[in-house]
Amino acid sequence: AHLQRKGEIVTEITGVTDFWPAEEYHQDFWKKDPGTYKSYRRGCGRDARLHDLWGDLATGH
């Protein structure tokens, strides 16, 4: 796959910090409550941003 944008992609690697696993009810939330998850994704702008970055490659995610 190719990005529709030009430029270098840079990801900063940082040191390890404390980590706490999420409670069980948070695991696979998108499967357990797909309607609420879909509403969340739409409301937070994630899908629009992915489409801005990836174009049609973002469809279905």
Image (tube, helix red, strand yellow):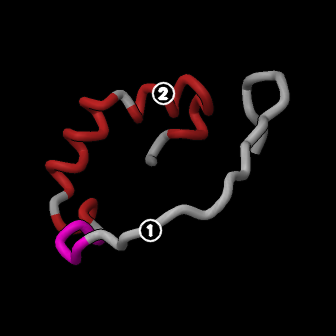
Q: Secondary structure at mark 1?
A: loop
Question: Which quadrant, please, contains the N terminus?
Answer: top right
Q: Position of residue 26 (x, y in %)?
A: 23, 66
Front-most of 17 and 59?
A: 17
Residue under the image location 20 percent in, 39 percent down: 39
Residue under the image location 18 percent in, 67 percent down: 32
Q: Position of residue 29 (x, y in %)?
A: 24, 63
Residue 4, above or below 47: above
Residue under the image location 17 percent in, 72 percent down: 25
- In the image, is residue 25 part of the stretch drawn in magenta? yes
**How far apart in space, not on screen, are marks 2 and 1 (Cα)?**
27 Å
- Please name the amino acid that badge 1 sits on: Phe
Q: Secondary structure at mark 2?
A: helix
Q: What is the count of numbered marks?
A: 2
What is the crowding at mark 2: few (fewer than 14 residues within 10 Å), some, or many (at least 20)?
A: few
Where, by quadrant of the figure, is residue 12 drawn? top right
Residue 41, above or below 8: below
Magenta residues? 23-27
**Overall secondary structure of the magenta section:** helix
Residue 22, above or below 15: below
Q: Which mark is residue 19?
A: 1
Q: Which mark is residue 49?
A: 2
Where, by quadrant of the figure, is residue 58 drawn? top right
Is 30 positioned to the left or the right of 14 in the image? left
| CB under 8 Å between discs 2 and 1 | no
Front-most of 38 and 8?
A: 8
- Please name the amino acid that badge 2 sits on: Arg
